[in-house]
Image (tube, rainbow, N blue to C red):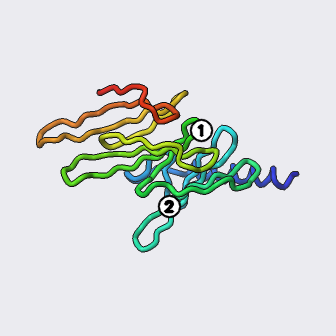
Amino acid sequence: MRKPVFAAIALVMMVAVAGASDHGGGPDRGAGGPGPAGHAIVGSDGTLYLTSESTSSGTTTVTVKAIRSNGSTAWTATLPAGARRLELSDGNLLTATSTTASDGTIASTLTAISTASGATAWTKAIAGRIGDLAPFNGGTYVFVTVPATTSGGSATHSIVAVDNNGNTLWTVTL
């Protein structure tokens, strides 16, 4: 009994030290985003969600592994192509990806991965580029920027409140 407890404590301490020395990164990293050596998020139940990157033939794949507080691996999931960060919100890990169409419009997809199973819980299309994700009790605030459509125009900034099931609660344009 002492060895598993010691191993769990050692693992949490390694994550704490790694997190304390994490000084952020470039534009591809957000809070909870994967770095070259991975990044960890600890859930309220003690589950560790550890991301890692691998590159093969110029394609980068980001995976997340759920390690329970007893040291067992619960599941491993591959994030959508282009995903560069994770945010824990209630029973989901959220990640965002963006694409730019030939006409310059930007579309983003918010993907929720179930912390219970590692399966995709839901996806939500959002017009514009998703910036920050800020969890709140009952959902996540999604900060969105829609670039100007004309030269000299202004970008539109908004906050979209999304509940834990992927439904839009409200949108405020700033």
The disc, 1 or 2, on the residue closer to the chain's N-terminal end is 2
Residue closest to the far bottom: 57
Q: Position of residue 89 (x, y in %)?
A: 54, 37
Within-10-Å neighbours for mark 2: few <14, some 14–19, many 20+:
few
**Disc 1 vs disc 2: which is toward the camera?**
1
User: Could you give the CA–CA distance between mark 1 and mark 2, rounded to whole angstroms?
Assistant: 26 Å
Q: Position of residue 168 (x, y in %)?
A: 42, 30
Q: Position of residue 22 (x, y in %)?
A: 52, 51
Residue occupying image coordinates x 11% and y 43%: 151
Residue assigned mark 1: 91
The kind of secondary structure element at disc 1 is loop
Residue occupying image coordinates x 61% and y 44%: 115
Residue assigned mark 2: 36
The kind of secondary structure element at disc 2 is loop
Residue situated in front as seen by the camera: 98 or 133: 98
Within-10-Å neighbours for mark 1: few <14, some 14–19, many 20+:
some
Residue closest to the far right: 1
Q: From this view, report whether residue 8 is shown above or below residue 44.
A: below
Task: Give the residue type at disc 1.
Answer: Gly
Residue closest to the far left: 151
Q: Quadrant of residue 3?
A: bottom right
Residue occupying image coordinates x 49% and y 55%: 79
Tally of numbered tags: 2
Please tell me the numbered disc located at residue 122. none
